[in-house]
């Protein structure tokens, strides 16, 4: 697929639609800051080549969202799902988790 710069995976967990997505250059790598680290494993973040436009649509459908990387987190920021203050940085890599609670 041309124009993809992310990898994603959608799956069910505890009755929720879960979306995990990371920037393509992070897949298979570990980001670390002191004792905090995240391994961007293919088993969790997936192997589906995804564009930022596709991710924007996927964000609307997911109940629980885990994003890792500048591009992935940037899509959620542009859509107004998060604010800058919601983002944590592991080293220089932005990470966010979003949980949509039923009303």
Image (tube, rainbow, N blue to C red):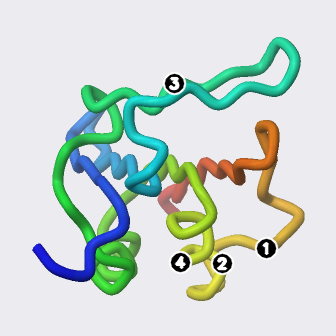
Residue 31 position (above or below residue 65)? above
Residue hosting label 4: 75
Query: Mark 4 to mark 3: distance in Å?
Result: 21 Å
Query: Tags 2 and 1 in contact by the CB under 8 Å rule?
Result: yes
Q: State the image coordinates of residue 72 (x, y, percent, origin top left).
A: 51, 65
Query: Do labels 1 and 3 touch, CB within 8 Å?
Result: no
**Residues tagged 4 and 2 counted as in contact (Cβ below 8 A):** yes
Give the residue number, with chain letter if any, for mark 3.
39
Quadrant placement of the N terminus: bottom left
Classify mark 1: residues with Cα within 10 Å, few (<14), some (14-19) or many (20+): few
Dot 4: element = helix
- Badge 1 or badge 3: first in the primary sequence: 3
Answer left or right for 31 relative to 90.
left
Q: Residue 77 carries which label?
A: 2
**Residue designated by label 1:** 83
What residue lies at 60% left-to-right and 48% top-to-bottom? 97
Q: Does residue 79 lie above or below 33 as drawn?
A: below
**Within 10 angstroms of label 4, few (less than 14), some, or many (20 or more) residues?**
some
Of tags 1 and 3, which is closer to the observer?
Answer: 3
């Amino acid at each position: 697929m041309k124009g993809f710069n992310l990898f994603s995976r959608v799956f069910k967990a505890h009755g929720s639609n879960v979306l995990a997505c990371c920037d393509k250059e992070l897949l298979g790598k570990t980001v670390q800051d002191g004792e905090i680290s995240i391994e961007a494993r293919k088993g969790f973040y997936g192997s589906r080549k995804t564009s930022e436009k596709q991710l924007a649509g996927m964000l609307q459908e997911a109940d629980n969202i885990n994003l890792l990387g500048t591009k992935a987190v940037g899509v959620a920021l542009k859509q107004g799902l998060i604010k800058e203050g919601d983002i944590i940085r592991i080293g220089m890599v932005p990470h966010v988790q979003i949980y949509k609670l039923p009303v």
